[in-house]
């Protein structure tokens, strides 16, 4: 068995499939699905999202400099897909997906109540890269769903069954097979 050579492209999978909520200055809001997102710095906490300029939500991010990354789960898979294939200029995605808005604590963009984690973000920089423009943003607040907190106060995101995107498909995360540092942990 050998390796087949593909043309250069984005094959860095799986990726988190997130719902990004946005709002304009008048308070009109929308949801869009983003798979091109990631952590870029831990101190200060920063993330990135990449958005095509022709997307309906793009102007809202430019206008306010704010957005919320809402992590998704197996239960939110249908809504996540819907928000990726329908345009907010044609439909009210909040209404059609039956997702509920809750106010952000710091940004004026609503958060998705059903999401296990909401990251309130403020744009610090925009990079025009080609088909997508990357918004670099500082995470100014994090909200977690208390139902995934254990008795020791540890947040158990994996219990929410996070959703990932891989090569055109949505997948649920699998079973835990280790933890950071387990390969070098001393045996008791």
Image (cartoon, rainbow, N blue to C red):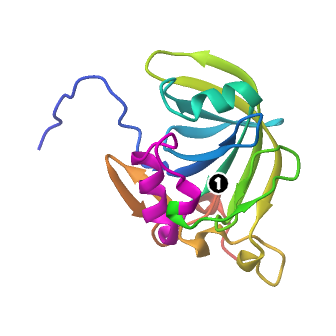
> Residue at (48%, 61%) from the top-left corner?
79
Q: Is residue 133 above or below residue 88?
A: above
Q: Residue furthest bottom?
A: 151
Q: Residue furthest right?
A: 106
* Residue 44 screen position, x and y as percent: 83, 35
* Residue 84 screen position, x and y as percent: 44, 47
> Residue at (79%, 60%) from the top-left corner?
143
User: Which residue is labeled 1 in the image?
Assistant: 70
Q: Is residue 17 above or below residue 133?
A: below
* Residue 89 screen position, x and y as percent: 51, 39
Residue 147 inside the magenta-drawn segment: no
In this rendering, would 181 be left or right of 32? right
Q: Nearer the viewer, residue 3 or 55?
A: 55
Q: Is residue 39 visible?
A: yes
Q: Is residue 89 above or below residue 146?
A: above
Residue 82 inside the magenta-drawn segment: yes
* Residue 12 screen position, x and y as percent: 41, 38
Neighbour tally class for label 1: few under 14, some 14-19, many 20 plus, Cα within 10 Å = many
In this rendering, would 147 be left or right of 87? right
Magenta region's main secondary structure? helix
Identify the element where label 1 is drawn: strand
Viewport quadrant of the C terminus: bottom right
**Number of marks present in the image shown:** 1
> Residue at (49%, 49%) from the top-left corner?
91
Q: Is residue 28 above or below residue 149?
A: above
Q: Is residue 177 visible?
A: no
Viewport quadrant of the N terminus: top left
> Residue at (53%, 54%) from the top-left corner?
93
Q: Which residues are magenta?
A: 73-95
């Amino acid at each position: 068995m050998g390796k087949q050579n593909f043309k250069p492209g984005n094959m860095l999978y799986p990726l988190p499939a997130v719902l990004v909520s946005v709002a304009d200055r008048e308070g009109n809001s929308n949801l869009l699905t983003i798979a091109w997102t990631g952590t870029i710095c831990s101190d200060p906490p920063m993330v990135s999202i990449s958005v095509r300029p022709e997307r309906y939500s793009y102007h809202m991010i430019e206008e306010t400099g704010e957005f919320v990354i809402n992590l998704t789960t197996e239960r939110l898979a249908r809504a996540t897909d819907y928000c990726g294939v329908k345009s907010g200029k044609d439909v009210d995605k909040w209404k059609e997906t039956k997702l509920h808005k809750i106010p952000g604590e710091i940004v004026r963009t609503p958060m998705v109540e059903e999401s296990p984690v909401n990251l309130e973000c403020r744009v610090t920089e925009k990079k025009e890269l080609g088909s997508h423009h990357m918004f670099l943003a500082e995470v100014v607040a994090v909200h977690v769903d208390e139902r995934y907190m254990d008795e020791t106060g540890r947040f158990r995101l994996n219990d929410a069954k996070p959703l990932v995107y891989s090569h055109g498909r949505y997948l649920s995360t699998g079973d835990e097979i280790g933890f950071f540092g387990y390969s070098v942990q001393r045996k008791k």
